[in-house]
Image (cartoon, grey):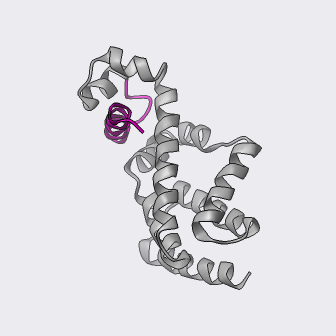
Amino acid sequence: MGRTRAGLLDGAARTFAGYGLRGSTMQSVAAAAGVAKATLYNHFRTKEEVARALLAAELDRLSALAGELPPDAALRVLADEVAGHPVLRRLARDEPDVLTGLLAAAPERWAEHVSRLARALRVEPDAAELAARWLLGLVLQPGEPRIRRAGAARLAGLLAAS
């Protein structure tokens, strides 16, 4: 990803975390990124397109992070990341319908996400499907850190046994 695009997505993350998606504008995203609005429009046509690009970039980052760790540590880190992500927390609290729309994936996109998770965790696709659904649940309801981490350890044990 280019430096400009990365800066735009960083500005979007700060803006969306602070104001939500509905409360943000293309102008506020551009300002947070330190660029002119025209620069933002050179990369993205709509705020929703920015949000989807941010989500895709975060999925890439999390997949890379998980791939560097043993599966049990990867699940724990992924759980903490999705449970504590400032944009996801803001949307879950203030705009759950927007969050649900962003997270809903067509079957082929879901299969792609599950496949990436399977590679990162080094497990079979069926096991990755279970992990993906668990992580998706944490986006919506993160729970207590201690319980979430215990769940990650339990899930890692189940995946290892499969």
The residue under the point 68% across, 43% down is: 105
Measuring from the top left, give residue 154's x and y in whole percent.
59, 82
Left or right side of 16 for 140: right
The residue depicted at 67 percent of the width and 78 percent of the height is 159
Q: Is residue 16 magenta?
A: yes
Asked if residue 74 lies left or right of residue 34, the reply is right
Q: Position of residue 4 (x, y in %)?
A: 33, 31
Up/down of 65 relative to 152, above or below? above
Q: Is residue 88 above or below residue 74?
A: above
Query: Would you say residue 11 sits in the magenta stretch?
Result: yes
Boundaries of the magenta span: 1-25
Res 104 quadrant in image: top right
Residue 107: x and y in percent read 76, 45
The x, y position of residue 43, in whole percent, is 43, 23
Whether residue 134 appears in this view of the structure is: no
Residue at 36%, 34% (x, y): give it. 12
In front: 21, or 39? 39
Quadrant assignment for the C terminus: bottom right
Quadrant occupied by the N terminus: top left
